Image (cartoon, grey):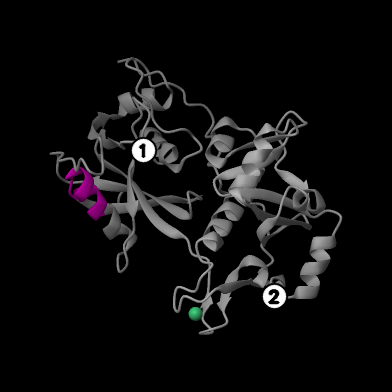
Amino acid sequence: MSPRPDLGPKPRLGYSASRIERAAERRSDAAAMKALENDARARAYVIAGELIVLRKGGEKLDPLFPCAEAYALGPVTESAFLGLIDGSPRFALALDLAVAETRKSDAAFEVTDLRSIAVRGLVEPEHLPPLAEGKALLNWHARHRFCPNCGAPNTLVESGWRRDCGACRTQHFPRTDPVAIMLPVAGERCVLGRSHRFQPGMWSCLAGYVEPGEAIEEAVRRETREEAGIVCGRVTYFASQPWPFPTSLMIGCHAEAITQEIVIDRSELADARWFDREEVALMLARQHPEGLTAPVPVAIAYHIIRAWVEDGVAFS
Ligand SMILES: [Zn+2]
């Protein structure tokens, strides 16, 4: 057997390891917030649904706008204070999608979606975590303009970190949705699946939302059994990743597969099958003889799979 391909240094996990200091204690202090907005170092990320507005100019595109320039792009529908980077205030501003679309024809800007920005490396990597923070937060606001409790319009407060209903006096806080993402393994083999929306030849971890009343380990076992018919025993946590599409938190795990037979739920998966470790190594390295691939390094699935290929998994 040929030697395992060298996968090189471990790439950075996208959207994680934020340098933002959220300074949550300042969110309710109107005077402090005004001072931060007027700080000469203040900058804003401009977000319209799935789209991010970027400035052209340097080698990489620049996602940061001086606040006045950001407001000049069009009516800002919501704004939020993301925090501080080395003392410099960072905000996220929401534009209507239609306004952002009009900027696509402007030579000064690039307007594209966050997935493309991350996968193609269009901005410096340190911008991905605050972009994820801003995009997920503004998406939550866009879907919670009316009180979920009584239906009355509610109001953004706390510099973008709460909505208050004046009618029933309920406070609503931005939420993130936990998703279990897992690699079932048994010795030298693992199970990978294909979603209906994947590019041809791409295989990845299984994944699904954690349901109310469910522990992460239980979600891992349930999703693996539902999607691929595999029963899992022990589950080991690996790492997590903010996944702002729209507001998820991916919780990465390895799972001990204790049955072999795969039964695919075709409503969830296009395909699922066992792979051996050497084949998966070639997929990670993009050297597979049939062109099969694993996910891009931006995604936690790449790191979950690579950790098993390189180090195996010790279940306890
Ligand atoms: Zn209400």
**Mark 2: is the Cβ under 8 angstroms from ligand 1?**
no
- The quadrant holding residue 11 is top right
Q: Residue furthest right?
A: 40
Looking at the rendered structure, the secondary structure element under dot 2 is loop
Disc 2 designates what residue?
A: 28
Q: Position of residue 226 (x, y in %)?
A: 20, 50
Location of the C terminus (image quadrant): bottom left
Disc 1 designates what residue?
A: 308
Location of the N terminus (image quadrant): top left
Looking at the rendered structure, the secondary structure element under dot 1 is helix
Q: Nearer the viewer, residue 32 or 302?
A: 32
Q: Residue at x 23, y 55 (%)?
A: 222
Closer to the eye: label 2 or 1: 2
Is residue 205 shown in magenta?
no
Range of magenta residues: 221-231
Residue type, numbered disc 1: Trp
Q: Residue at x 70, y 55 (%)?
A: 75
Q: Residue at x 29, y 57 (%)?
A: 219
Q: Earlier in the sequence, mark 2 or mark 1?
A: 2
- Image position of 303 (left or right of 229): right
Please identify the dominant SS of the magenta region.
Answer: helix
Q: Please tell me how crowded label 2 is: few (under 14), some (14-19), or many (20+) other residues with Cα within 10 Å.
A: some
State whether residue 247 appears in this view. Answer: yes
**Mark 1: is the Cβ under 8 angstroms from ligand 1?**
no
- The quadrant holding residue 113 is top right
Q: Are marks 2 and 1 in contact (CB under 8 Å)?
A: no
How much space separates mark 2 and mark 1, taking CA atoms?
A: 45 Å
- Image position of 119 (left or right of 220): right
Q: Please tell me how crowded label 1 is: few (under 14), some (14-19), or many (20+) other residues with Cα within 10 Å.
A: many
Residue type, numbered disc 2: Ser
Q: Residue at x 44, y 77 (%)?
A: 149
